[in-house]
């Protein structure tokens, strides 16, 4: 299609014409020198000036930022906006609103405004459309407008921030970690959620975008030139406010005392290799702040003594022998003792996980006659499994030996979720470790994000948020004997707050949030 000069408008602007041939017709359409102006048919051409809002450059100061996104020509979510202002005032934070657009002539609010470059007037002082380094390891990406209906808004941006983490404005909440060399922390990419109301078309794509629209924001605490802490604000429509951390919630433009968290789901524990720094920060800083009712444990035991990955490697077997790490009974009982000590005063939930299940696999796989160190424990465990085995409705059933040993301690504050069982907290399924997916396939955040209920999963050690799924990280150090030179692990837990909203909490340099 070629544009040709076609006179001038009454305002003196050059008018351009293109000719499009359709069946039995010869229709001309016109547009002005503004390349974004809509094409209009001959005879109905009228110059219309689209409202354009100039967003002045602004400087960002301070070390606490609340970052969200706003759609053009769309009303603000007033209760959420007031709560954000109260939060910023109470925490000496700076509100940053990334302007976005939704180009669709049938969006809900006035079709004549669908492409207008204007934003709600109360948001204008907070708009920010630049790219800015908040510190040496975190960039705010305010100059990229991602279509609000994008299914995976972070796709393709893995390298755009180089080695630094990045925050992108978008109404769908998504978080992913990008692997980096082991001498550096993995980079985090995240979207923000929105401060404007849901404004989408009634098409399939529009309705899907509306379903995933989140009233939310990102809180960034810049602790130093290299260290930052990042977490999400997740607004509760029912409560007309939100909780950040555990002591306060914000609603009606005011600050209120927050209810305790429903639960904290720990990153995979792997006792024996849990990082003491992360454990200390978890129990000394995070839990006193959140005051959770329940603790949920994934991969509680590392099962290093019975790891199938060591078979045939005499050097690893020798190292285990010298360190006493080949004693299975000792690892099992020490793991349970550690959990009981750390979980004292809380209701503890143990999720069936692949590392805990290595004990059962060891009994099935190994020959006790070739392992004098563990022969007695092996035979005790095998006998208990044998006596419990029966034929059920769907096939053979045998008890889980690790859960049997946990329950043998008779702790009234510990509950083991059975294999393939369910444990729901505030409407969120928490019994899925993440190693197994639908219909027996390998599990992942991608194939567990759309199973119906919201879920919190573990297993990969790489935190993430994708639609209905939140994924935790690990309590261990960020590299192990089996990891390669590049990794995406982080020390990340997930909390379910008193309003039933989920939050990821990542430990950086021994802290989950900026020390007060």
Image (tube, rainbow, N blue to C red):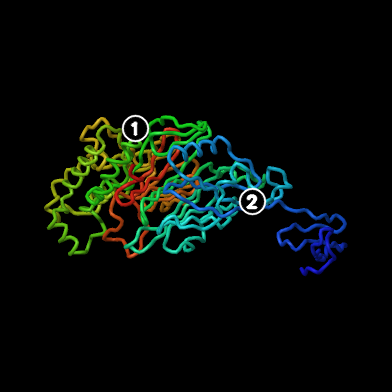
* Cβ atoms under marks 1 and 2 closer than 8 Å: no
14 sits to left or right of 75: right
Left/right of residue 308 with respect to residue 116 in the rendered view = left
Residue nearest the observer in this picture, 416 or 52: 52
Mark 1 vs mark 2: in front = 2
Secondary structure of the residue carrying tag 1 is loop
Q: Which mark is residue 188?
A: none
Q: CA distance from mark 1 to mark 2?
A: 42 Å
Q: Which residue is mark 2?
A: 102
Residue under the image location 86 percent in, 63 percent down: 26
Residue at image position (39%, 60%) is: 179
Rendered location of residue 225, percent (x, y): 37, 56
The front one of 418 and 412 is 412
Q: Is residue 347 above or below residue 103?
A: above
Percent x, y of residue 449:
48, 47
Q: Quarter-wise, where is residue 345 in the image?
A: top left
Question: Residue 463: image x %, image y %?
Answer: 40, 51
Disc on the earlier residue, 1 or 2 = 2
Callout 2: helix, strand or loop? loop
Q: Which residue is mark 1?
A: 293
């Amino acid at each position: 299609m070629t544009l040709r000069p076609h006179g001038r408008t009454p305002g003196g602007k050059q008018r351009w014409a293109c000719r499009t041939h359709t069946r039995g017709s010869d229709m001309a359409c016109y547009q002005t020198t503004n390349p974004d102006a809509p094409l209009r048919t001959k005879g109905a051409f009228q110059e219309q000036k689209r409202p354009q809002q100039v967003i002045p450059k602004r400087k960002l100061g301070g070390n606490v930022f609340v970052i969200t996104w706003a759609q053009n020509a769309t009303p603000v979510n007033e209760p959420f906006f007031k709560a954000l202002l109260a939060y910023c005032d109470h925490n000496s934070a700076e509100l940053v609103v990334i302007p976005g657009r939704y180009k669709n002539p049938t969006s809900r609010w006035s079709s004549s405004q669908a492409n207008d470059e204007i934003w709600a007037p109360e948001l204008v002082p907070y708009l920010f459309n630049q790219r800015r380094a908040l510190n040496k390891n975190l960039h705010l990406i305010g100059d990229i407008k991602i279509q609000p209906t994008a299914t995976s808004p972070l796709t393709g941006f893995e390298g755009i921030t180089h080695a630094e983490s990045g925050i992108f404005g978008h109404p769908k909440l998504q978080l992913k970690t990008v692997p980096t060399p082991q001498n550096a922390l993995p980079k985090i990419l995240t979207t923000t959620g929105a401060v404007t109301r849901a404004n989408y078309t009634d098409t399939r794509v529009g309705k899907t975008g509306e379903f995933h629209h989140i009233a939310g924001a990102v809180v960034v605490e810049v602790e130093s030139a290299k260290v930052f802490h990042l977490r999400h604000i997740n607004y509760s429509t029912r409560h007309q406010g939100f909780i950040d951390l555990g002591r306060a919630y914000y609603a009606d433009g005011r600050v209120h005392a927050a209810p305790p968290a429903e639960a904290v789901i720990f990153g995979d524990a792997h006792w024996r290799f849990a990082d003491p720094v992360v454990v200390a920060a978890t129990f000394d800083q995070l839990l006193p702040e959140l005051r959770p009712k329940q603790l949920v444990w994934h991969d509680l035991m590392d099962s290093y003594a019975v790891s199938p990955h060591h078979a045939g490697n005499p050097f690893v077997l020798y190292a285990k022998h010298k360190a006493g790490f080949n004693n299975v009974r000792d690892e099992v009982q020490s793991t349970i003792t550690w959990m009981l000590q750390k979980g004292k005063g809380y209701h503890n939930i143990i999720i069936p996980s692949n590392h805990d299940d290595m004990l059962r696999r060891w009994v099935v796989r190994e020959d006790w006659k070739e392992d004098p160190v563990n022969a007695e424990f092996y035979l005790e465990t095998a006998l208990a499994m044998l006596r419990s085995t029966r034929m059920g409705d769907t096939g053979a059933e045998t008890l889980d030996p690790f859960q049997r040993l946990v329950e043998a301690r008779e702790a009234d504050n510990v509950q083991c979720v059975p294999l393939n069982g369910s444990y729901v907290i505030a409407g969120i399924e928490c019994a899925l470790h993440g190693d197994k997916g639908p219909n027996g396939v390998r599990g992942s955040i991608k194939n567990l994000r759309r199973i119906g209920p919201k879920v919190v999963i573990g297993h990969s050690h790489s935190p993430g948020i994708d639609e209905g799924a939140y994924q935790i990280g690990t309590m261990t150090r960020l590299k192990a004997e089996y990891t390669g030179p590049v990794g995406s692990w982080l020390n990340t837990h997930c909390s379910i707050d008193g309003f039933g909203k989920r939050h990821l909490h990542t430990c950086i340099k021994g802290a989950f949030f900026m020390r007060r």
